[in-house]
């Protein structure tokens, strides 16, 4: 396959295939993402946190100083756009998520077309996100959006390194700068993915004595990064929050990461490598094929070959070295399944007929839908012929009865979804409690104690497994100023309590 195949040419000549892939993505996410209007609510705590901080930003509250979390700023601005589209549901975020996945699948197809004919590229583009679905939880995570950006860069890296050319157009480096800055401002450790491939591009240009091109590409990368970072910095500077943004996103997260010593880090990496190989055998082997065998076999440029392999191990280390690991953290390294599938597809033969396209479309879509277990709920509930159930709706019904209710959720759990269900605009900075130990960030618990002592909040949600449960459960002000009006037993046997202020 000609490695000079351009995006515009592909869109023009293969628009029917790309249209079919777009329909595939929309259907896949309609069934497999709880952002979808098919589901009553996405109860995932992180998503509701992002969404409600997004609403606060839209209402004029300043991120970090008036609306607190320690994630990167860009994820909140993304959710602010979704909340602008639909402030009472996740429909806006479903549209944004769908656009992102369509872009990801398009670039997966373009990458596959560098090595394979249409029918095989079509299969790869459809099967690639299916494996990723196994770790996307309910949909909409920060890691998911970073993975989309990575796939775009992966295409341009592979296309450049495939035959070892010395020409690298600055406009592509501009794209790398732009989307790596997106990752930097969402989850800083994952930007390591770009380090070695970018270094390889610059080294290759220098060795080819393309000094003018080297300078142009460096400038283009910086310009791309500034397109994203400058507006964010201006936002914080204009609101007098630049110092606080640095202290929370950089300093606090550095303390929160709690990376151990070398021996502990090696132990974590080794143990998690074994666990991936044992319990996620097929997926992990596909990833290893894409990360190691594919560059050795199909990347012609030596520096590009080395860079792709080092990029994988650096990304793997960034994800798995920390003692704090949650399964959806690994979404970004699933992008290496793409070159893994490209390698495997070179060993199969499929006729490029309309019947083959139709069968593959149907089979892979069904396979993708089966990756999720959302259909364990009753069909009647799914189709909304009955009222939806769950903590968010049970507590939400009580909270909504009040005029302009206010709410504090002392935890990072399903209680966050009550804000969304009851359409409550958070009124205090620490309206939820991220998983930050009091020793690392004592200001949060101190402020929340003040809210309760001063009776600033009408409703309080307290979960038995909340990090500060014992402290708040025994807090005299909570028992003096508030009374339990409802409780909910979750599937994990954790009990949630809804407190209401005694007026």
Image: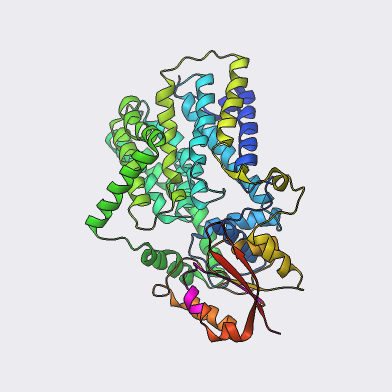
Q: Position of residue 478 (x, y in %)?
A: 58, 82
Q: Is residue 470 magenta?
A: yes
Q: Position of residue 297 (x, y in %)?
A: 32, 25
Q: Position of residue 431 (x, y in %)?
A: 58, 71
Give the camera-side residue of 147 and 161. Answer: 147
Quadrant assignment for the C terminus: bottom right
Give the camera-side residue of 96 and 32. Answer: 32
Quadrant assignment for the N terminus: top left
Q: Is residue 268 magenta?
A: no
Q: Which residues are magenta?
A: 459-472
- Asked whether, in this view, residue 191 is left or right of residue 381, the answer is left
- Asked whether, in this view, residue 390 is left or right of residue 370, the answer is right
**In the image, is residue 347 above or below residue 126?**
above
Q: Residue at x 53, y 19 (%)?
A: 119
Q: Residue at x 41, y 31 (%)?
A: 339
* Quarter of image, res 436: bottom left
């Amino acid at each position: 396959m000609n490695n000079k195949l351009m995006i515009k040419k592909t869109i023009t000549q293969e628009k029917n295939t790309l249209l079919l892939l777009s329909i595939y993505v929309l259907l896949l996410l309609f069934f497999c993402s709880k952002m979808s209007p098919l589901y009553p609510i996405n109860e995932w705590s992180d998503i509701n946190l992002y969404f409600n901080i997004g609403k606060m930003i839209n209402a004029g509250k300043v991120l970090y100083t008036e609306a607190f979390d320690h994630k990167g700023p860009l994820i909140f601005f993304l959710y602010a756009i979704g909340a602008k589209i639909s402030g009472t549901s996740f429909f806006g975020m479903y549209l944004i998520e769908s656009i992102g996945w369509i872009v990801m699948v398009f670039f997966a197809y373009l990458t596959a077309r560098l090595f394979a004919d249409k029918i095989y590229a079509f299969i790869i583009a459809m099967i690639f996100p299916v494996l990723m679905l196994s770790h996307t939880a309910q949909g909409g995570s920060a890691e998911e959006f970073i993975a989309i950006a990575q796939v775009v860069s992966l295409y341009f890296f592979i296309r450049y390194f495939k035959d070892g050319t010395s020409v690298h157009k600055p406009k592509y480096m501009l794209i790398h700068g732009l989307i790596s800055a997106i990752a930097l401002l969402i989850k800083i450790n994952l930007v390591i993915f770009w380090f070695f491939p970018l270094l390889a591009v610059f080294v290759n240009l220098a060795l080819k004595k393309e000094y003018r091109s080297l300078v142009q590409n460096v400038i283009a990368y910086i310009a791309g990064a500034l397109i994203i970072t400058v507006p964010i910095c201006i936002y914080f500077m204009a609101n007098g929050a630049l110092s606080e943004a640095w202290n929370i996103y950089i300093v606090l997260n550095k303390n929160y990461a709690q990376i151990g010593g070398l021996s502990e880090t090696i132990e974590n990496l080794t143990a998690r490598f074994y666990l991936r190989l044992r319990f996620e055998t097929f997926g992990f082997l596909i990833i290893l094929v894409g990360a190691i065998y594919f560059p050795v076999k199909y990347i012609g440029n030596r520096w590009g070959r080395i860079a792709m392999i080092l990029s994988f191990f650096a990304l793997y280390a960034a994800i798995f070295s920390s003692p704090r690991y949650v399964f959806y953290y690994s979404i970004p390294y699933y992008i290496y399944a793409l070159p893994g599938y490209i390698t495997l597809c070179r060993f199969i033969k499929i006729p490029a007929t309309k019947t083959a396209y139709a069968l593959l479309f149907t089979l892979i879509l069904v396979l993708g839908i089966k990756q999720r277990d959302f259909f364990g709920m009753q069909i009647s509930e799914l189709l909304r012929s009955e009222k939806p159930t769950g903590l968010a709706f049970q507590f939400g019904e009580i909270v909504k009865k009040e005029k302009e209710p206010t709410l504090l959720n002392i935890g990072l759990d399903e209680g966050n979804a009550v804000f969304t269900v009851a359409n409550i605009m958070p009124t205090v900075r620490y309206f939820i409690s991220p998983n930050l130990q009091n020793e690392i960030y004592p200001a949060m618990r101190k402020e929340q104690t003040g809210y309760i002592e001063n009776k600033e909040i009408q409703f309080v949600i307290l979960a038995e497994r909340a990090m500060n449960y014992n402290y708040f459960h025994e807090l005299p002000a909570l028992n003096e100023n508030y009374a339990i009006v409802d409780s909910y037993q979750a599937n994990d046997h954790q009990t949630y309590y809804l407190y209401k202020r005694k007026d």
